[in-house]
Image (spheres, rainbow, N blue to C red):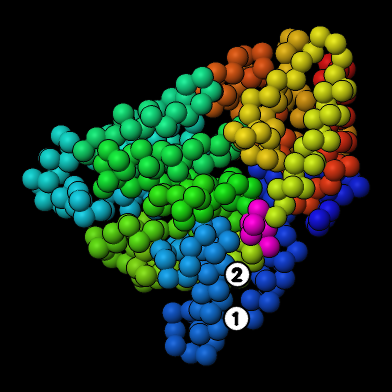
Amino acid sequence: MGNSSSASSSSSTYFDGNGTTPLHPAVHKAITESLDCYGNPSTPSDQGKRAKAVIDDANESIKAHVFGVPPECGSVVWTGSGTEGNHTAVLLSLLQDTHASHTQSTKKNKKARAKNPPHIVTTTVEHPAISKHLASLEDLGLVSVTRVKPRGGEVVVEDFAEAVGDTTVLVTVIRAQNETGYLADVAGIAKAVKAVNPRCLVHSDAAQAASKVDCRVSEGGGLEGVDLITVVGHKLGAPKGVAALYVADSVSTANVEQGGVLLKGGGQMKGLRSGTENVPYIAGMGAAAKEVAAGLRYVPQYRRIVTRLLAALQGGLPEGIEAVFNCGSDSKGLPQTLSVGFRGAPGLTSGHIMRECMERGVIVAAGSACDANKKEVDYSQILKEFGVGAEVGVSTLRVSCGFWNTEEEGEFVGRTVADVVSKY
């Protein structure tokens, strides 16, 4: 399928797809065509009906090609970011009928909530959009949180069954860890959790997973049994500023008041998220679901690229320096992501490698893009949670390709990284 975008050019080779992706050509076309659908989709005018039809088509596309469900199953809540989608999922879990008393405003119920707040289970390796949100709610006394740590570099299914109790309202687990590419068995976690507490909802942040691994909620899918799923446009060839939250029919919305869960107002999207819909970007994400995510069509290309990259990287390192792979590109990791550090090069940092690569026209990431501006010489808490030691941790790069890359570029990136490390 080759190089289908101008993201990699004669001036640079872009291998930070987990940070963000370029627009897929089909997405660009869908956005451009939908710009003429200027009507308000909430109005009955012909222009409004055209705009609503664009949204309906996008709903069907993402349900079919990402979540693996027919149009009549579940709901799609279009949001402005994955962060908003994650926050909405958490708040929806607090509005379920089974613990509605926690959400009432009477003094009696406020006291009861303070003594026995709703319980949420998560991991210590979530994206900050989840981890910081839960910490904030916990600081306010609105929830209690159990954080499950990886064991032996693995997120263990059984640990979640043990952590869940009668007051647990939500288990939220990232499908693909954004820094390492590690894939959690969220379907297995959902099955184990619901065997203990059938009322408990399960959410997954699938921002990095959609289009790269199975995110279907249908039987046998990678997210089977999951009630709430967040996917993000700019991780799969659509623009920044649009994301989607899948809400299964198992999620009650009866207690959602004032026209929205997080954003309240006019009551768009079946009363779950107020605000006039961003029709062009929603159209773009629908196109991305069809052209990028459908059938995981680019995965064979990713594997070929990574194979060439690995061969060049490992073949180019001198004796005494070892590439250590924290996760990625195997059965437990994303097929297009490598989290790689180096042993045998004391003092080598990912920041140094990243800067030297940039000077040579190669764009890779030092850990997560969301943490790239930190100045202190340290390494990611996520890597620490997975048991990665300091020497490897401080030198760890995240290399992630996409639909726009070629096998030749993969080989070039591998050679470049090896040369930078060798000359340190």
Q: Decide: few, some or many residues near mark 2? Use Cα within 10 Å; few <14, some 14-19, many ≥20.
A: many
Q: Residue at x 63, y 29 (%)?
A: 327
In the image, 183 versus 348, the foreground residue is 183
Q: CA distance from mark 2 to mark 1?
A: 10 Å
Disc tally is 2
Above or below, 296 against 132 in this view is: below
Q: Residue furthest left?
A: 108
Q: Decide: few, some or many residues near mark 1? Use Cα within 10 Å; few <14, some 14-19, many ≥20.
A: many
Mark number, residue 283: 2
Position of the N terminus by quadrant: bottom right
In the image, 222 versus 83, the foreground residue is 222
| Secondary-structure class at tag 1 | loop
**Magenta span:** 291-296
Q: Position of residue 400 (x, y in %)?
A: 71, 39
Q: Do labels 2 and 1 touch, CB within 8 Å?
A: yes
Q: Is residue 123 magenta?
A: no
Mark number, residue 317: none
| Secondary-structure class at tag 2 | helix
Above or below, 261 against 259 in this view is: above
* Residue 117 visible here: no
Q: Position of residue 281 (x, y in %)?
A: 60, 66
Mark 2: amino acid: Ala
Q: Which residue is mark 1?
A: 37
Residue 266 horizontal side relative to residue 8, left or right? left
Above or below, 289 against 280 in this view is: above
Above or below, 30 against 156 in this view is: below
Which numbered disc, 2 or 1, marks the residue that appears first in the sequence?
1
Q: Position of residue 41 (x, y in %)?
A: 48, 79
Q: Quadrant of residue 121?
A: top left
Q: Position of residue 198 (x, y in %)?
A: 27, 46
Magenta span: predominant SS is helix
